[in-house]
Structure formats: structure tokens, C-alpha cells
Image (spheres, rainbow, N blue to C red):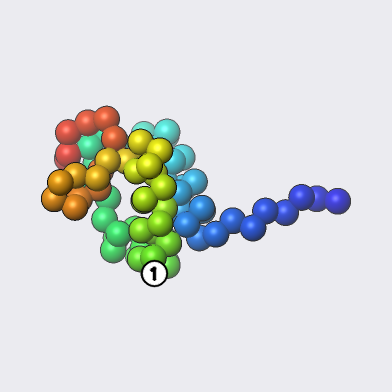
Amino acid sequence: MAKTTNKTASDLIMDTLQKAIKAKHLLPGQELTQVKLAEEFGVSRMPVRDALKMLIAQGVLEKLSNRHICVAGGKRQ
């Protein structure tokens, strides 16, 4: 029997962002906004916020002092 996974919207967003970063579609220092990402993924800001928090905890993204979030490893673009 095939194994099914119940991924949440946050998990799918997190996976997509990680793949985009690895593929260099999102570059170090590039700023990400909850509103824009929510529009792109067709979801509310809540799952986007959760995905961003998880990626910050993993060190993939950085939360700046001005509440902005960017891809880790570079100056903000």
C-alpha cells in the first residue's frame, strides 16, 4: 500500500521556498514578505508566517531587526 503524507500548507510552502533557495531562484539577501508570498501561494498569511518561522529556526532565512525577513547568507537586496 502506498504511504500517504499529510503535509500542511506551511510544510508545502516551506518545501517550495527551500527548493527555490537551493535552485538559486531566491538569492542570499533577497527580502521575502508575508503578503506577497501569501498571494503567490493562494493562502492566508498564517501558513506563510509559520513556514517563515520554521525556515528562520533552521537558519535558511534571517529575521532582521526591522522585522523584515531575507534569505540567509547575504546583504539585503
Instruction: Pinpoint residue 36: horizontal percent, then vertical percent.
Output: 29, 60
Is residue 25 visible in the rendered structure shown here? no
Q: Which image quadrant for residue 46?
A: bottom left
Q: Which residue is outermost to the right? A: 1
Amino acid residing under circle 1? Ser
Residue at 36% from the left image edge and 51% from the top image edge: 52
Q: Which image quadrant for residue 24?
A: top left
Q: Give the vertical position of 41 relative to 75 (above or below).
A: below
Instruction: Pinpoint residue 47: horizontal percent, then vertical percent.
Output: 43, 62
Which residue occupies the foreground of this view, 23 or 10? 10
Q: From the image, tell me which residue sits under label 1.
A: 44
Quadrant in which the C terminus appears = top left
Q: Give the vertical position of 44 relative to 26 (above or below).
A: below
- Left or right: residue 65 versus residue 8 is left
Residue at 45% from the left image edge and 49% from the top image edge: 14
Is residue 68 visible in the rendered structure shown here? yes
Instruction: Pinpoint residue 61: horizontal percent, then vertical percent.
Output: 32, 41
Name the secondary structure under disc 1.
Answer: loop
Residue at 24% from the left image edge and 45% from the top image edge: 63
Q: Give the vertical position of 10 relative to 46 (above or below).
A: above
